[in-house]
Image: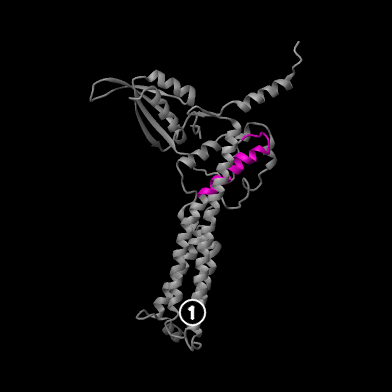
């Protein structure tokens, strides 16, 4: 009777799994430890890029603050009747800074999303049972790397930056403009005098005041209308919503696989519908079924130019599986013809259940 119990078998299995290659590339084998090292380097690289764009955000805000301070100082030290116009020009300049910062914020969120995805679905998964990442985290990260998309819309980013920083700058500029027109060089004696001072060149004061109220009101309205948009991964939001019991994550059952990162987009990864025209349908289908675990449908077709009979294979995939499909077809039938078409929605096995 052997003296090796279950514990020795477990150790042996762990030794095999630690040396088993994850994938090969041109003869080189990537082990599990190499994969973890690569993920660590990717994580640090994405943090570096996120920090770089975070600094660019701060730089744009600093430009707006510095120009606002300089304009306020200039306006109150200049006693000419048209000096308040520089405040209006600065308001337009601050709006330009806001638009630039909105674009930078969208790029920042792109890198921040990847960082949060690795934090919640890779590193955090090492700390709690069942000690494995979510089933779809690798595909989510790969899809974002292959086909980057901004996690937030332009208007969501615009509204968030306006509420966080620029709302106070706009309020300060508006208040300073009113004080400048009303009190300099002396306090206005009547509303008519105030409107007369508000005029800029040939533009009546009433028009200038109305345009200012409409402009600032529109900016503020956009900020408040976009308040409910919460797609940004950098936002500190309730984890899984109110009333979620974090202890339920620690149970080793199938429900764990249904847990998703709190910031994970509800938008599904892009789905692909492919047609493969080949004279080796059996060989191609077998590789796809066994290696990609995807179903294949075979149709018969005729090339109208040559009059030859060909097989047409139909496969539904995720966008991250397209490179593997191309490699299989290229290896088996270099003369094959592959058509890749984006699909609006795919329902059935391996995708969204048809009953939902």
Q: Position of residue 10 (x, y in %)?
A: 70, 23
Placement of the N terminus among the 4 image quadrants: top right
Q: In the image, is residue 220 above or below residue 251?
A: below
Q: Mark 1 points at which residue?
A: 74
From this view, report whether residue 82 is shown above or below residue 22: below
Q: Could you tell me residue 144's position as x and y percent?
A: 49, 42
Q: Could you tell whether 108 is left or right of 205 in the image?
A: right
Please state which of residues 136 and 324 is positioned toward the viewer in this rendering: 324
Which colour style is shown?
Answer: one colour
Q: Position of residue 9 (x, y in %)?
A: 70, 20
* Residue 268 at least partly seen: no
> Where is residue 280, by image quadrant?
top left
The residue sitting at 42% across, 82% down in the picture is 82
| x and y percentages locating residue 233 in the rendered image | 56, 49
From the image, give the main secondary structure of the stretch colored magenta. Answer: helix
The answer to whether 164 is drawn above or below residue 229 in the figure is: below
- The answer to whether residue 206 shows anywhere in this view is yes
As helix, strand or loop, the secondary structure at mark 1 comes to: helix
The local crowd at label 1, few if under 14, some if 14 to 19, many if 20 or more residues have their Cα within 10 Å, is: some
All told, the count of numbered labels is 1
Whether residue 166 sits left or right of residue 192 in the image: it is: right
Q: Which residue is drawn at 41% across and 72% down?
A: 211
Viewer-nearest residue: 71 or 184: 71
Compared to 115, does 16 lie above or below? above
124 falls in the magenta region: yes
| Residue drawn at x 44%, y 64% as measured from the top left | 96
Q: Residue furthest front?
A: 27
The image quarter in which residue 121 lies: top right
Please provide the residue range marked out in magenta.
Answer: 110-132
- In reply to whether residue 297 is colored magenta, the answer given is no
Tell me what residue is drawn at x 26 percent, y 24 percent: 303
């Amino acid at each position: 009777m052997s003296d090796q119990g279950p514990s020795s078998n477990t150790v042996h299995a762990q030794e095999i799994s630690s040396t088993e290659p994850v994938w090969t590339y041109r003869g080189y084998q990537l082990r599990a430890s190499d994969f973890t090292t690569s993920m660590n380097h990717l994580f640090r690289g994405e943090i570096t890029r996120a920090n770089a764009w975070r600094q660019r955000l701060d730089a744009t805000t600093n430009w707006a603050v510095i120009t606002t301070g300089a304009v306020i100082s200039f306006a109150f030290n200049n006693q000419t009747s048209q000096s308040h116009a520089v405040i209006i020009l600065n308001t337009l300049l601050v709006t330009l800074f806001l638009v630039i910062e909105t674009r930078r914020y969208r790029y920042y969120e792109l890198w921040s999303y990847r960082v949060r995805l690795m934090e919640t679905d890779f590193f955090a998964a090492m700390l709690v049972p069942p000690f494995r990442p979510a089933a779809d985290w690798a595909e989510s990260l790969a899809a974002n790397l292959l086909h980057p998309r901004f996690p937030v819309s332009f208007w969501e980013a615009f509204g968030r930056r306006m509420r966080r920083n620029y709302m106070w700058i706009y309020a300060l500029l508006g208040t300073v403009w009113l004080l400048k027109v009303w009190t300099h060089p002396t306090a206005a004696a009547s509303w008519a005098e105030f409107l007369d001072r508000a005029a800029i060149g040939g533009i009546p004061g009433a028009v200038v005041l109305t345009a200012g109220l409409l402009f600032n009101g529109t900016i503020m309205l956009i900020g408040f209308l976009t308040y409910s948009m919460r797609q940004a991964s950098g936002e500190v939001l309730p984890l899984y919503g109110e009333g979620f019991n974090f202890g339920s994550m620690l149970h080793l059952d199938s429900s764990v696989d249904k847990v998703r990162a709190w910031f994970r987009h509800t938008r599904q990864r892009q789905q692909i519908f492919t047609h493969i025209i080949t004279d080796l349908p059996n060989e191609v289908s077998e590789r796809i079924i066994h290696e990609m675990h995807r179903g294949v449908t075979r149709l018969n077709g005729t090339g109208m130019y040559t009059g030859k009979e060909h097989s047409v294979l139909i496969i539904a995939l995720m966008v991250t599986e397209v490179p593997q499909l191309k490699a299989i077809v290229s290896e088996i039938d270099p003369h094959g013809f592959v058509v890749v078409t984006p699909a609006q929605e795919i329902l059935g096995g391996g995708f969204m259940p048809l009953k939902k």
